[in-house]
Image: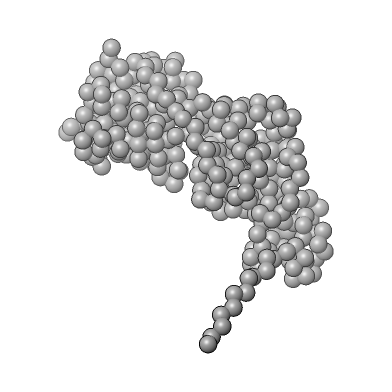
Amino acid sequence: MAVSMVVEKRAVTIRDIAKATDYSIGTVSRALKNQGGLTERTRARICTVARDMGYDFGNLRQGEVRRIAFLLHRQHNTPTHRPFYSPVLHGAEEACRRLGIALSFVVVGPAEPVLELVRLHEPDALLCAGFFEPELVQALRDTGKPLVLVDMRLPGYRSVNPDHQLGGYLATRHLIRTGRRRIAMLSGPMSHHSIQERGRGFRKALYDARMLSDPDLEVQLPSMGDPAENVRRAMAGLLAMTHRPDAVFCYNDSSALTAMKHCLDAGLKVPHDIAFVGFDDISAAATAIPPLSSINIDKEALGAMGVELLMQKTTGPELEKTLSVQLVVRESSNDD
């Protein structure tokens, strides 16, 4: 009779990595924790060997969190995105102030020495706001520091997100209820979780209203080039259609404001000829002429939730929190 035996594989330790690399345990520990005092070549070699050996970076013991680095991708550090992420940063700052924690603000990009930039601030934990390349997020997690994604979602990571799908649904349902029947959507890069979800909400609202989704009315804006010019070209194409749209749901307020101005300049009346709803409810939405309907996100609460999740002791890496959103109706979509 055959006897089967199950041999449990032993977890790789810092001592194992030290032996494999001929470095001291202290040097290996500093490299894995992304601490100073080492050359980048030494750090890279140790981390590469650790990954190849299957070391679990989540095993690194962390002390008390006294400083958090708020990381913003360079692509979001623009006039278009700052009205959204500045309040998120402010919310994180206020939460840190209440907890007696210092907060550093770091703008990073994939072509930069990200780990070096982060190390200068000596953070105990990381808060990544907006879209980041998965490879960059993995490199940050490999530092062994607690990490939370804000306004981004990746499997296996803790994250805090607005209810993007609900927002897309509420915006589109509102336009349907005001009698609009050819509703277009201006969308951003599909690599962003938030934009995917807003599109799902848009299509779900059409489905629930038993309206066909016309792919010609869904326009994905280019990620390269001047954002405002991209929006103007997209709107010119929509207005040139034989049956042009009578409403547009835009994936953010900046694109909605540009699209609305293009239509006004073309002689259309808003909302009589064409209605608009944006997303994010930045301050410029309420002061626009006409004022822009939008999906409101409590951006400061979003930043605070990210800090709270960082401080939360969890047994597993994956924990997601969702922040509810609401529709703010203004003149751009309301004939009354």
Between residues 150 and 217, which one lies in front from this camera angle?
150
Residue depicted at x 32% and y 35%: 202
- Residue 325, given in percent of the width and then of the height, sits at 44, 28
- Which residue sits furthest bottom? 1
Quadrant for residue 22, please give it.
bottom right
Residue depicted at x 66% and y 38%: 311
- Residue 118, given in percent of the width and then of the height, sits at 69, 44
Between residues 314 and 306, which one lies in front from this camera angle?
314
In-image side of 54 versus 291 (left or right): right
The number of discs equals 0
| 313 w.r.t. 171: above or below | below
Between residues 259 and 321, which one lies in front from this camera angle?
321
| 270 w.r.t. 33: above or below | above
Q: Quadrant of the C terminus?
A: top left
Answer yes or no: is residue 187 visible. no
| 61 w.r.t. 267: above or below | below
Answer yes or no: is residue 281 visible. yes
In-image side of 16 versus 309 (left or right): right
| 67 w.r.t. 93: above or below | below
Residue depicted at x 29% and y 23%: 275
- Residue 32, given in percent of the width and then of the height, sits at 72, 56
Quadrant for residue 98, please give it.
top right
Residue depicted at x 30% and y 37%: 204
